[in-house]
Image: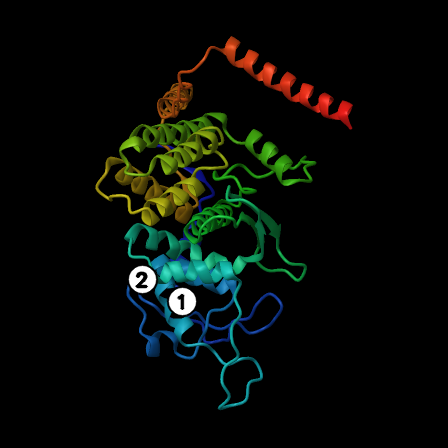
Amino acid sequence: MRQHGHQRGTADRSAETHPRRDTAVPTSAGGRPVAREPALDRGRPAEPGRALDGHRVDDAAQVLALQRAVGNRGVGAFLAVQRMMPAPAQGQAAGQAPAAVVNPVEIQQLQAYHATVRNAQVRSLLDELIPHLQRVTTWNQTPGRGGGNTRNLGPPPTGGPNQYQINYAAGGTDSERIAILVHELTHVAVNEAYHSDMLNYPVAPLPATSTATTEGQRQTERIGATNRNDLDSFRAQVVGNAATLLELLPQAGFTQARMQEAADKLSAHTAQNPLHEYDAVLSHLLVWADHDGVSRTTPFYEKLTEMVTEAAGWREAGIITPTADAGSLPAEQARALTARRAMTVPTPAPAAGPSNHRTIRGRAMNILNRLAERLSRDDRS
């Protein structure tokens, strides 16, 4: 089994497992005091009076630190409690009502979905993704309902965590938009896990001689600096997973239209761009399955949730451990192509009617007759 990524040292892991209880007030890089993270037991629901204890977690760095300390489920429980107990606005006098918190509609929709979803796999995924909402500083709606894209804007000029811009198609239904937003937010989680210039693989750092100035150039150089056999092993596993889902998709329980959309995601995105569109497509399909009421006992759903869980574990560890043979990539690509072609909707045969020759002749005669009538009217005028 291969392990790829940047493993942290023993001291770092020990510090995470046994956090030091300092008595001094922690400060940020700028010297400002930082609120301590509230104590939460991993996987245990938060108790409002005890868990908050007068503290709030409003900064993205604090949320991510809390996530490392107590896990995704603990973060989700804490944020749900915090939303019910808003903090007073800065400079607010005692006794006054707290100022209203204004969130972009995208954040409201994702938080509402997180608060109401009953699917355990979707809730676990959202527990991981919701803390990253604070990193998204720009939301842009675009026409249509096709999809979206995510840009890493880098840290702000004053320093701090990366900020992101998400552009997404807003022309579909609420459930369509939610699936796109979860897809794009997964790209954010991937980049934060691997620091990979938006690739869903922990590629090698930029070479010291790099002259790259754009994200695409950095991706190309970092892919070139990464072990080719390791990359092909990952690609083979991703494309093989896409082929498996494509083979199981016709019995998943989706409508014909949704099945074709899912097939396009798996073939045109994942199978053709395994380093760009794996984790996010899995998230997208999981939300579609939840919204469309797909049975959780189908082989398609069971395989999909296996893959979602595996990818989430890779992101949490910052390490990818594919098991596929690197040499199997061409065979997996052929399998994915075959499975996709098997789902192509056949073009209906034309209805029986007159021969092409007679049809063309009839149309020509109609045009000539109309032209003759027009010339006749012109002569009489």
Q: Amino acid at mark 2?
A: Arg
The image position of residue 26, as x and y in percent, is 51, 71
Q: Residue furthest left?
A: 297
Image location of residue 191, percent across then percent down: 51, 46
* Image quadrant occupied by the C terminus: top right
- How far apart are the two marked residues, 1 and 2, measured between alpha carbons? 14 Å
Q: Residues within 10 Å of mark 2 (few under 14, many from 20)?
A: some
Q: Mark 1 or mark 2: which is in front? A: 1
Q: What mark, if any, has residue 79 been given in the picture?
A: 1
Secondary structure of the residue carrying tag 1 is helix
Mark 1 Cα within 10 Å, few/some/many (few <14, many 20+)?
Answer: many
Image height check: is 356 above or below 225? above
Q: Which mark is residue 21?
A: none
**Percent from the top left, x then y, of residue 270?**
44, 33
Seen at 50% across and 44% down, the residue is 145
Which amino acid type is shown beneath numbered disc 1? Leu
Q: Residue furthest front?
A: 380
Residues 148 and 364: in front is 364
- The quadrant the N terminus occupies is top left
Q: Which residue is mark 2?
A: 42
- Helix, strand or loop at mark 2: loop
In the figure, residue 19 lies in which quadrant? bottom left
**Is residue 299 shown above or below 58?**
above
Q: Is residue 296 left or right of residue 188?
A: left
Marked residue nearer the N-terminal end (1 or 2): 2
| Rendered view: 144 above or below 138 | above
Q: Which residue does the image show at 28% across and 36% down from the upper left? A: 252
